[in-house]
Amino acid sequence: MTEVTVTDVQHKAETILAEHGLCDHCLGRQFARLGFGLENWERGLIVRDRLDRGKDLDEESFVRDNIPDEEPGREGCGLCDGLFVELDRYVNRVLNALDRYQFDTFLIGCRPPAEVVEAEEALWEEVGIQWVEPIKSEVNRLIGKQIEEQLEVTVDFERPDINAIMDIGKDRVEMQVNSIFIYGKYNKYSRDLPQTRWPCGNCRGKGCDDCDWTGKQYQESVEELVAEPFLRAAKAVETKFHGAGREDVDAKCLGKREFVLELVEPEMRNLDPQELADKVNEMYGDRVEVFDMQFTDRHKVEEVKSRRADKTYRALVQLTDSVSDEQLERLDQIEGTVKQATPTRVEHRRADRVRERTVHSVDWERVDEDRFELTVAAEAGTYIKELISGDAEKTRPSVSQLLGTEAECIELDVIGIEY
Ligand SMILES: [Zn+2]
Ligand SMILES: [Zn+2]
């Protein structure tokens, strides 16, 4: 686009009026950055009035006192194609679309028809872009203002609850309802519960005989139990569960693991997280317990997911052979640095490499000749089951290696998470 800048207000106005019969909105919009607290149609009236009466028109002319006492022309023009005449209809379309949602903040966007945008660009090329506002932003502002007044809600450019986009050409509203984020911590008391929904390995979620047509490998998950009362109260489309790491399906977690529950496309937003958390604990407290649930925002998801917390575990270890107390003393040697190649059980989803992790402390209590309880405090990301079994020497040192017999972790609990 060649930019022709006509700097003089009067000259620009005269050129526009001589060549184009613009409506008050479209005329005023070419001077939108002049004057404060005026609508473009008011600027349009000022321009027309002053030129009609042979008065000077300059940057100082755009004040409230200069608005003539007349209604704006409502007929539209070749530039806007009557778009402003239809404004109330667009407002109603948006109101209808917003009707079923509870929200406090919103943002309006619009998509003017391509011909209108082209006509606007052609005009700018002719008379310059100094002081102009695009038609799109005027329409957004005018619709937004009416919605604010009618629904007592607020326009928010940063983080609105809802974005509504009025597609003027297609005469329809596209809605983007932003998620609600709720922060909390959980304990898991079941040894048969994955953290998130786990699709059936056979049908991958479609439903088959193997999974009784549920599409799921496990019928429940921490995510589903925690989400249920929230999903219902918010009338959300679905949930996403963002955990600060996860424990194995068969491991308990007693260390209060952080998570963010995301409610996708909620209709209701005036929720009471504490009350809903109480419901989770009442209904499913034998399997999951939640703590400290409260509203948060999208940024918390990354924060929680990138958390690398050291953890303390309690493991029940089964040995193939009996061991003496002297042998058990050797377990002290696990403290310090351990080298772990990617475990066999996760090889299919993790890159194969050797990681060094620090084991801060170990403690043990004998349960039987060939069985003991091991308490390990270790750096984030340490594979505990492999630290015990040795995983065919892929982890060194290991409980098995130090005791000289096969060792298997038969129960694992996360008992502490250091935030
Ligand atoms: Zn117009
Ligand atoms: Zn299945």
Image (cartoon, grey):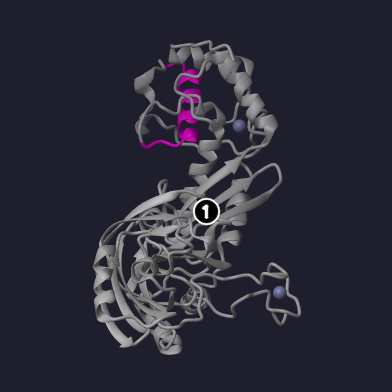
Residue 403 x %, y %: 35, 71
- Quickly name the residue at label 1: 350
Residue 374 x %, y %: 31, 76
The residue at 63%/33% (across/down) is: 80
The residue at 51%/81% (across/down) is: 192
Above or below: residue 110 compared with residue 241: above
Q: Quadrant of residue 180?
A: bottom left
Residue 66 x %, y %: 39, 29
Q: Nearer the viewer, residue 319 or 169?
A: 319
Position of the N terminus, as image quadrant, is top right
Q: Amino acid at mark 1?
A: Arg
Q: Is residue 194 magenta?
A: no
Lateral position of residue 263 relative to residue 215, left or right = left
Above or below: residue 199 compared with residue 149: below
Position of the C terminus, as image quadrant, is bottom left
Above or below: residue 245 compared with residue 25: below
Q: Quadrant of residue 185?
A: bottom left
Our reading of the magenta stretch's main secondary structure is helix
Provide the residue span drawn in magenta.
37-55
Lateral position of residue 3 relative to residue 314, left or right = right
The residue at 56%/65% (across/down) is: 99
Helix, strand or loop for disc 1 = loop
Q: Is residue 46 magenta?
A: yes
Mark 1 surroundings: few (<14), some (14-19) or many (≥20) residues within 10 A: few
Which quarter is ligand 1 in? top right
